[in-house]
Image (spheres, coloured by chain):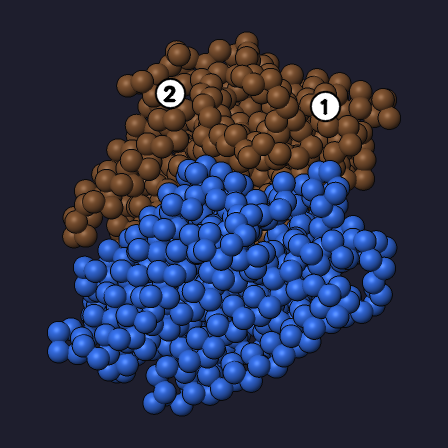
Chain colours: A brown, B blue
Amino acid sequence: MQYQFLGIGYLTWITFLPILGMIVVLLIPRANTNAMKWTALGATILQLVFAALIWVNFNPALTGINDVSKFQFVEQTTWINLQGAGWFGHVVVQYFLGIDGLSLPMVILTSLISFVGVIASWNINKAQKGYFALYLLLDTGMMGVFVALDMFLFYVFWEIMLLPMYFLIGIWGGPRREYAAIKFFLYTLFGSVLILLVMLGLYFSVSIKDPVTGQMTHTFNMLAMMNPANYDPNSLLGGIGTYWRDVAFIALFIGFAIKVPIFPFHTWLPDAHVEAPTAISVILAGVLLKMGTYGFLRISFPIFPDAMLKYAFPLAILGFINIVYGALCAMAQTDFKKMIAYSSISHMGVVLLGIAAMNTQGVSGGVLQMFNHGVVTAMLFLVVGVIYDRAHTRGLDDFGGLANQMPVYTGIMTVAFFAAIGLPGLSEFVSEMLSYLGAFQTFQWVAIFASIGILLTAGYMLWALQRVFLGQLPEKWKGLPDVNGRELVAFVPLMIVVILLGIFPSILLHPMNASLNHLVDFVHKVGTGLSAAK
Amino acid sequence: MAQTIYESFGYVLPETMLSIFFVLTLLTALVGKKRSKYLPAYMALLGLVLAGIFVFRQIGVDELVFSGMYAVDPFSWFFKVIFLVTGVLIILFSLQSRELEAVSTKYPEYFSLILALTIGAFFMAGSSNLLMMYLSLELVSISSYILSGFTKENARADEASLKYVIYGAFSSGLMLYGISLIYGLTGETNLYAMNQALAVGSIPRITILLAVILMLVGLGYKISAVPFHFWTPDVYEGAPITVTAFLSVTSKAAGFAMLMRFFKIGFVDVTAVPAMAGMWAIFKGFNWTDIIAVLSVLTMTVGNLVAIWQSNMKRLLAYSSIAHAGYILMGFVTLTDQGMSAILLYFVAYLLMNLGAFYVVMLIANKYHTENVEDYRGLGYRSPYAAFALTVFLFSLTGIPPTFGFIGKFYLFSALISTNYIWLAIVGVINSVVSLYYYAKVVRYMYLVEPVEKSRVEFDFGSNLLMTLLVVPNIALMLYFTPILSWAQYSVTMFGLH
């Protein structure tokens, strides 16, 4: 097999490197906190190296989505293989990893954000051992979600993230951390059990021929679930556009929507974001939210194309609500961090609007927006973290005139804010434009109304900028130091990405293109094919 | 079928061994006092190990012995292993229990009663005759009455024991009434013969319905299904922790084993092909599974909802164990082999996580002298390893990866989905989300709340080792559960089916 290091595939490395780091961290004596930080940093840097290797070796011509031969860096071995006792229960679970143009940006994003997150965690001053161990476990969970192609494996990675996240918010978070942590936990667990049920329904509906024995077996293989021919005719989710297929689609939708989060399942997000420590907010907004939309594209849409086409319009409406509602809420906030949190809801609405359009522009825009929002929002949360570390307050109205006091900081924040507004030349402009463009083709009026969101975003972002940086500097902030070297290390890579992707977006769009085109094609062909056959 | 009594004895060697050691353990009271107060414990352990060897030699045996009284089949074999492992762990726990230390002069009685309960559980798992069922049930019950009131200086333990006796006597009386009705209708006490009688005869449906419901009362009491659960919280709270842990696994598993055998052997239409399709065919026109389904929904919902308000760890775990009985009943609703194997798998998980949780609670009670959830504050900083272990057990009970509890739940739900009990599966998953709240509450106190005192409290090597022995399979079996699952699938075979 190609692309191996020490006999183990790249994807296994990139997924389980953090676990190795975690074990090392756990073995380090309690007092030696520097060693823990450097171990975590080392693990994430190595992860970044693997991500770079994967990006370099990635073949943009291959489509992936539903065809295993078009996936790259594939690793497929049997994890659980139970022959069963004859009359029932042949169980096969595969350790099946692979990436295509849809997961590639997410893999890169995860490595990048995890690396930045470690730097942002540098001055954690409580129970560092637990913190970095959990952080690295979280990292593995996130990466695993984006590379898993077996649904059971996907689910396990999806759930593994919950525990570290609960503790990271609950132990190292702000004053209302306990409430935020349990709320996050309950919401996401509720979402994931719905995913679990749909997964089981799919498992019992799909059967493929075992390549060795030739007998028909049920499977968790996502790619097999995408092929309508594999469904048993009388099974629960077999057939075309049936009641249960709609139910399953909606259940899956709720499961993923909680993660995105899509209105009305969003209420955990402001709490979790505000209470989480800076690095964890970065991870939450930068990576975790993308899992929801990734789930739509990887699982919901290709497996239930008929239902997807049927519900495309409601999805677009929800996208619209997210955009406008998120922006309006953001505008009303006086807490800096809460404003950013609501802006995430608004920006994820753009993703939803784009992918609901189900055309090349919309989906490419959506996926690119997932990446760009990850980077930009990470910057925004870091920006908040910097000011909070110094002033111990996040009130937008508490500041003023910081531009003179912290010029470098002001520069960074301006870049981040303008990227979030979608200024041409910065990354989010391209992705938002593509998303709206795609949406305009399919849902003209929804797109037109949703574009109010752009205006609102500019409104609250510029207003916040004004309140923090312009005007009179209050007496008590006269001593605030500017951004230090460590913080710059976190900001600079993100800024480079933001500007680079603003000027030259095709470095990311190009490798995505073949896969996303195929995805759009596939959903339309299979979806309408199924509906026509009905 | 081994017909003669002499032949039959060859099949009950584990039970015989346990009975011999029951007596020997009791006799240590006469000889052992000078040497070591732990002698009875070692004696009981030896008995369990020797019985284990005989059980091990019964792999694959599928026989009906003592003229159809008792089945030695893979199904009962599976449960026997569960009982033995539980027994060994409980004895090891008991040696460290501070509550029991106070009554150490009565160790011989205590450990011999543990063996007696185990013998009863063995017989419950294998009984295929109504009278035998009743007798073994009583053996388990009477042993547990005494055990739960064992620390009799403790008023709460006395109350627990008395409540247990009254509830137990009442429900076993009802069960006996059910048995007598069945006997009156069919003229048989043997389950296989009863099955045939039901299949051919024209028996009044309403009477048999009543009889079965009466049987369900008796069995429901044993597995603490709602609404027969009222004794559970009081007994679990009042009894010594080791006894609570023991009851929560062995007594419940034995109850389930008997429940499954009674319904599968008694009411399955053996002529139908395949066997699972003929389930309940005897009661045409009445959907029996709905009764069990309602029982299951009630049990898990009440268990989970009430658990949320508990502040005593033992009480919390008591309600949690009621909820788990509800989950397990979900597997029974399907009545398919898949549902049965899911139940068996779940019991392995339940043993590991529930005993683990009780063990840590006991260790904490030993050192911190409290069972109150609020006193667990800051435990994650004061006793990091115990807190970590308890966290693993609690999340395993919730059923979140990467723990074995997840696999257990996963298989229960998959059995439901494959038989199209979607609504029940939805109720089940919502219940596990609810359960997260109270399990996480304990975790919250341990990690999220700052401790009042900062001093560290460490446990000795033996305790840490035992915790590790329970933590490791809770995680490792999630990563690789093939052997347990194949064992569970193999063990759904009961004598006379398939």
Q: Quadrant of the N terminus of chain A?
A: top left
| Up/down of B317 relative to B126, above or below | below
Q: Residue at x 28, y 71 (%)?
A: B25
Give the x, y percent position of residue A491. Answer: 36, 36
Q: Quadrant of residue B326?
A: bottom right
Q: Quadrant of residue A383?
A: top left
Q: Residue at x 73, y 38 (%)?
A: B273
User: Residue B250: in sight, yes or no?
Assistant: yes
Q: Residue at x 78, y 50 (%)?
A: B281
User: Residue A492: in sight, yes or no?
Assistant: no
Q: Which residue is mark 1?
A: A228
- Label 1 crowd (10 A; few <14 / some 14-19 / many >=20): many
| Up/down of B109 relative to A495, above or below | below
- Label 2 crowd (10 A; few <14 / some 14-19 / many >=20): some
Residue type at mark 1?
Answer: Pro
Determine whether the residue tagged by mark 2 lies in a helix, strand or loop. Answer: strand
Residue type at mark 2?
Answer: Gly
Give the x, y percent position of residue B440. Answer: 46, 61
Q: Is residue B107 left or right of residue A245?
A: left
Q: Residue at x 27, y 57 (%)?
A: B466
| Up/down of A263 relative to B303, above or below | above
Q: Which residue is mark 2?
A: A9
Q: Is residue B256 left or right of residue B50?
A: right
